[in-house]
Amino acid sequence: MEYKLSSNARCAVIGYGTWATALVGVLTANEARVGWYVRNPEVLESLRSEGRNLRYLSDLEFDPERIAVSDDLNEVVANADIIIMAAPSAYLKAFLEPLTVSLKDKFIISAVKGIIPGDYKTVVEYLHDTYDLSYKQIGIVTGPTHAEEVSRERLSYLTVVCTDPENAAVVGQKLSTKYIQLSYSSDLYGTEYAAILKNIYALAVGMAIGLGYGDNFLAVLISNCASEMTRFLAESYPDERNTQASAYLGDLLVTCYSIHSRNRRLGLMIGHGCSVKTALNEMTMVAEGYFAADCIRHINFRHKIEMPIAEMVYQVLYEKGSARKLMKALTNKLV
């Protein structure tokens, strides 16, 4: 079955966090009206009354005529052709729980950089399996783009990933603005797993900074993270891909060094001596790397790929390992 998008396909966004909010801001530059499923009553009211998400990116103002905000998921989905998933992966199942409208005639875009906890599946894999969707009707929006900078219209680069380049072009038209540069890919597997792995590696970098390691070591650590990511992708799903491109290496780099990176922040707190539980409780937003560390380790049981950095992060997060001791042991495994 063919899934061909038309240029007048209607868009909707699921989620109300920073990335969902920033994406709605991008879409409203091109679309007359954007559907928006917001299940938080406080955020819903602030968007309706003030045109702002007072909880996330409160400086970003929306034209009420260009957003169709609703807490009725089925209404939002029914009135859209392209559904962009932008809720944290840990809560995506809860967001979609009220859904009764069929997704069979929809085109689904994942803007989520995480794994469904407990299911050990990526968002694309989960959508494919749970809703019986073809990979031809699922795409990804990824790249080194922190929502905080996108919302301020700072130059950013997005990669649109679809199996059909014509569908990718339609999605790209809707995301193209003066501050968004676009590239395209068909590597659903590689771009999604790269976006998941980089969160784990940003945790490792945050731990290293918190423990007092310097720039020289961080350069070596991040270089090894890039190599580990490339090795995982090549051995788990061989394909012709350039892992030096921004959707792979660029996203890794910005997540490791940016002050906006919540995964780096979580690692930093642990490196400073916070317990994992305390650090998680202090986070105001979801750090996807926490769940990813467990899921990637589980997935790697069948691949048996050498991943010492991801394994170190897992041991700190889930086996109460000492970040200081494990990082010290890791330094002897890096090149």
Image (tube, grey):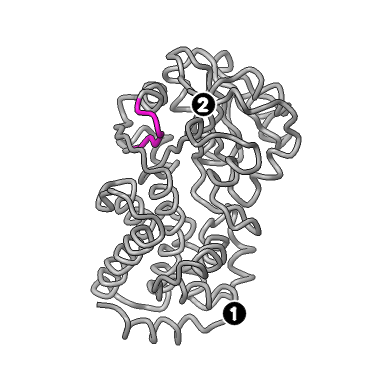
Give, as a three-letter code, the residue at label 2: Glu
Q: Residue at x 54, y 15 (%)?
A: 33
Question: Relative to 224, is 8 above or below?
Answer: above
**Numbered range of the magenta stretch:** 158-165
Secondary structure state at the residue bearing disc 1? loop
Place of residue 217 in the rendered image (x, y in percent of width and height, measured from the top left): 27, 75
Residue most toward the front? 1
Q: 10 Å neighbourhood of mark 2: few (<14), some, or many (≥20)? A: some
Q: Residue at x 55, y 53 (%)?
A: 115
Secondary structure state at the residue bearing disc 2? loop
The image quadrant of residue 151 is top left
- Residue 173 lies left or right of residue 276; in this view the side is left
Question: Relative to 137, is 222 above or below?
Answer: below
Q: Which sits earlier in the primary sequence, circle 2 or circle 1?
A: 2
Magenta includes 20? no
Give the label on residue 175, or none: none
Question: Relative to 15, is 306 above or below?
Answer: below
Place of residue 263 in the rendered image (x, y in percent of width and height, measured from the top left): 48, 60
Q: 10 Å neighbourhood of mark 1: few (<14), some, or many (≥20)? A: few
Place of residue 53 in the rendered image (x, y in percent of width and height, measured from the top left): 59, 33
Magenta includes 159? yes
Residue wearing tag 2: 61
Give, as a three-letter code, the residue at label 1: Glu
Residue wearing tag 1: 319
